[in-house]
Image: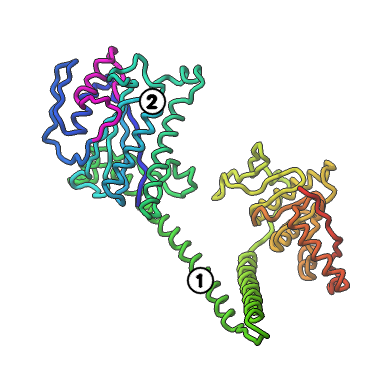
């Protein structure tokens, strides 16, 4: 699969490095440093697949980097900036060249720099997919006459100077460049008809439950290749991370396979049901026959949709069968402290496997739930009761799926909190006397429109049939939902 790698570092004299040596090594050429007189000869180096220069104003590689060296006077000067870029092994050479050209042009448009790119083949004995590019860019802008600017590009400025001039910090600039790289690569992958994609975001930001691999380095890599695994500590750690991530991949694939099998089973059942419900008839003419055929197909589609909904409802009930209300101990404090509230009224888990995920959100007149976890329901009820006690709400009324309304009613019973909006069965009364599409409201008018419409239909049905057969079930009144 395509991987994201777009890292930057500085070629600095403070570390004993020079732009001429870096350029000579990456291009496998010989360049004499005119400032020091040192000859950097790497002509015997192998593995350079492509050499590309952009916005160099006709200067050769040797001339450009000697110019960069001579422009700097300090002993700790930053003479060049390097980007190491992983090229997708799934793409061909012309695609790689387009990616490099587009990325280089984006840097030129932003910083007016000269750019030198060398594409390297995978190292001998390494991963054959490790095709990568080394991009060197000047730290000063270059003029059309081939001279470098007096000031550094603002990518090299200090954060204090950037803020003073109303510019983004260096970290934010680098993050934007990394995002641009991912965008360009993904567009090329899509153009090639591939489903692969990369992201500049971290695994945590992508909500991927994997451990990031560490940088092994050339020494540990070489030790591992020579068989000295015990001495290659970073290589060992990286192998352990890979093994863990492979287990995560297997779990994800297993879950995906189960979801696909479930979907296939639902579809197969519906198709078989549709086959059994054959249709036909006679008509006065071909127009009438065609119209009747369309009506019959529509009826079958509705029947098919209802069967799938029934199957899904059965699955939801099966999941809910093991649900139990949370047993609240008042002596241990409030349940709502298990969640953090942000400025938007979103309550998130503070610990456990769901740490950082949204549990419910308070919009003022309604609390929208994302789960039927009993502890989250208990917290919702505590918050709702506070609103009732403060006079903000007249009552606590549940809305949404029947599963949610049942669960919140049961949880309310265990906490001695009255919850309206659910009609319990005799068994539930005797025993106890998912999604933003469920939650609590201060009154019937605060229930979102689509739920109020469902409630209105139920009330109309109750009125037509003369009430419920169960005398223990509460009667409901029509809900007039206000426009939100």
Region rendered in magenta = 52-80
Which quadrant holds residue 30?
top left
Q: Nearer the viewer, residue 37 or 340?
A: 37
Residue of label 2: 111
Residue at horizontal 77 percent and vertical 46 percent from the top: 365
Q: Nearer the viewer, residue 249 or 70?
A: 70
Q: Disc 2 on helix, strand or loop?
A: helix
Q: Nearer the viewer, residue 80 or 319?
A: 80
Are there few (<14), some (14-19), or many (20+) residues within 10 Å of tag 1? few
Question: In the displayed structure, would residue 49 be above or below residue 274?
Answer: above
| Horizontal side of residue 321 vs 127, given as left or right | right
Residue of label 1: 264
The numbered mark at residue 107 is none
| Horizontal side of residue 179 vs 320, given as left or right | left
Q: Disc 1 on helix, strand or loop?
A: helix
Q: Spatial distance from mark 1 to mark 2, Cα to Cα?
A: 53 Å
Q: Nearer the viewer, residue 151 or 380?
A: 151
């Amino acid at each position: 699969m395509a991987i994201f790698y777009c890292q930057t570092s500085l070629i600095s004299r403070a570390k004993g490095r020079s732009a001429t040596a870096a350029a000579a090594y990456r291009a496998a050429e010989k360049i004499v440093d005119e400032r020091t007189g040192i000859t950097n000869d790497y002509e015997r180096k192998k593995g350079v697949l492509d050499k590309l220069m952009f916005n160099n104003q006709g200067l050769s590689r040797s001339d450009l980097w000697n110019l960069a060296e001579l422009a700097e006077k300090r002993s700790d000067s930053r003479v060049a900036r390097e980007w190491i870029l992983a090229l997708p092994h799934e793409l061909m050479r012309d695609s790689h060249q387009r990616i490099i050209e587009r990325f280089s042009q984006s840097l030129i448009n932003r910083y007016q720099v000269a750019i030198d790119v060398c594409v390297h083949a995978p190292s001998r004995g390494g991963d054959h997919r490790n095709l990568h590019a080394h991009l060197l860019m000047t730290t000063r802008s270059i003029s059309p006459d081939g001279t470098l600017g007096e000031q550094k590009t603002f990518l090299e400025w200090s954060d204090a100077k950037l803020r003073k001039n109303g510019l983004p910090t260096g970290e934010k600039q680098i993050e934007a460049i990394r995002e641009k790289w991912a965008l360009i690569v993904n567009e090329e992958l899509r153009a090639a008809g591939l489903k692969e994609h990369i992201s500049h975001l971290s695994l945590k930001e992508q909500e991927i439950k994997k451990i990031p691999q560490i940088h092994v380095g050339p020494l540990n890599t070489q030790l591992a290749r020579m068989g000295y695994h015990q001495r290659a500590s970073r290589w060992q750690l990286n192998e352990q991370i890979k093994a863990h991530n492979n287990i995560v991949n297997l779990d994800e694939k297993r879950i995906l396979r189960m979801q696909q099998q479930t979907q296939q089973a639902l579809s197969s059942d519906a198709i078989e049901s549709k086959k059994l419900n054959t249709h036909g008839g006679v008509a006065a003419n071909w127009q009438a026959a065609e119209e009747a055929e369309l009506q019959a197909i529509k009826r079958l589609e509705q029947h098919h949709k209802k069967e799938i909904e029934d199957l899904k409802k059965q699955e939801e009930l099966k999941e809910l069968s093991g649900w139990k209300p949370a047993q609240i101990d008042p002596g241990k404090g409030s349940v709502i402290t298990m969640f953090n509230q942000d400025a938007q009224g979103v309550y998130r888990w503070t610990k456990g496997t769901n740490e950082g995920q949204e549990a419910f959100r308070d919009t003022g007149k309604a609390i929208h739930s994302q789960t039927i976890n009993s502890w989250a329901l208990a917290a919702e009820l505590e918050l709702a009761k506070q609103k009732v006690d403060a006079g903000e709400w007249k009552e606590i009324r549940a809305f949404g799926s029947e599963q949610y309304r049942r669960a919140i009613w049961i949880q309310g019973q265990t906490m001695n909190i009255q919850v309206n909006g659910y009609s319990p069965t005799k068994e539930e009364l005797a025993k106890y006397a998912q999604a933003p599409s469920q939650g609590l409201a201060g009154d019937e008018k605060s229930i979102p429109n689509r739920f109020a419409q469902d409630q209105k239909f139920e009330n109309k049905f109750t009125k037509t049939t003369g009430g419920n057969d169960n005398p223990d079930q509460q009667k409901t009144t029509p809900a007039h939902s206000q426009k939100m």
